Image (cartoon, rainbow, N blue to C red):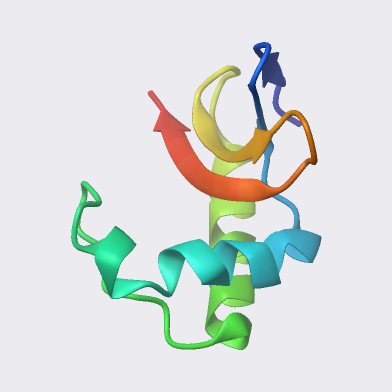
Amino acid sequence: MGHELVTERLRLRPWGLEDAEAAFAVFGSPEVSRWLSPALEPVGDPRAMRLLLQQWIAEDSRVVDPAGRRAIELSEDSRVVGGVALL
């Protein structure tokens, strides 16, 4: 289920449901969501973020690696700081 891409500073890895709180901190923010393409309204709460992660995980199971959505973590502390979609 998805390759990891690792640099000195960042790790791109598949999303997991355990990421819901960290993902909500990013995707629940209007300051972040207004810059997303395609557009995404701010996620309303951690439960809604968990449902969105379930959708992303299901979609990723149907694409060929390395395509799919990935969490972006800082290598130094494994903190999720964003996300990316690889096409």
Is residue 86 shown left or right of residue 53?
left
Task: Name the residue located 43 percent from the left edge and 87 percent from the top edge.
Answer: 44
Task: Name the residue located 67 percent from the left edge and 68 percent from the top edge.
Answer: 20
Q: Quadrant of the N terminus?
A: top right
Task: Point out residue 50 in the picture as x, y percentages from the top left corner.
Answer: 64, 73
From the viewer's perspective, is residue 46 above or below residue 17?
A: below
Is residue 40 shown left or right of residue 70?
left
Is residue 60 shown left or right of residue 41?
right
Task: Point out residue 21 in the picture as x, y percentages from the top left corner.
Answer: 68, 72
Task: Point out residue 17 in the picture as x, y percentages from the top left corner.
Answer: 75, 63
Task: Name the residue located 69 percent from the left edge and 15 percent from the top edge.
Answer: 6
From the viewer's perspective, is residue 70 above or below residue 52?
A: above
Q: Quadrant of the C terminus?
A: top left
**Front in this rendered view, residue 7 or 60:** 7
Is residue 56 shown left or right of residue 14?
left
**Front in this rendered view, residue 44 or 60:** 44
Which of the 4 image quarters holds residue 85?
top left
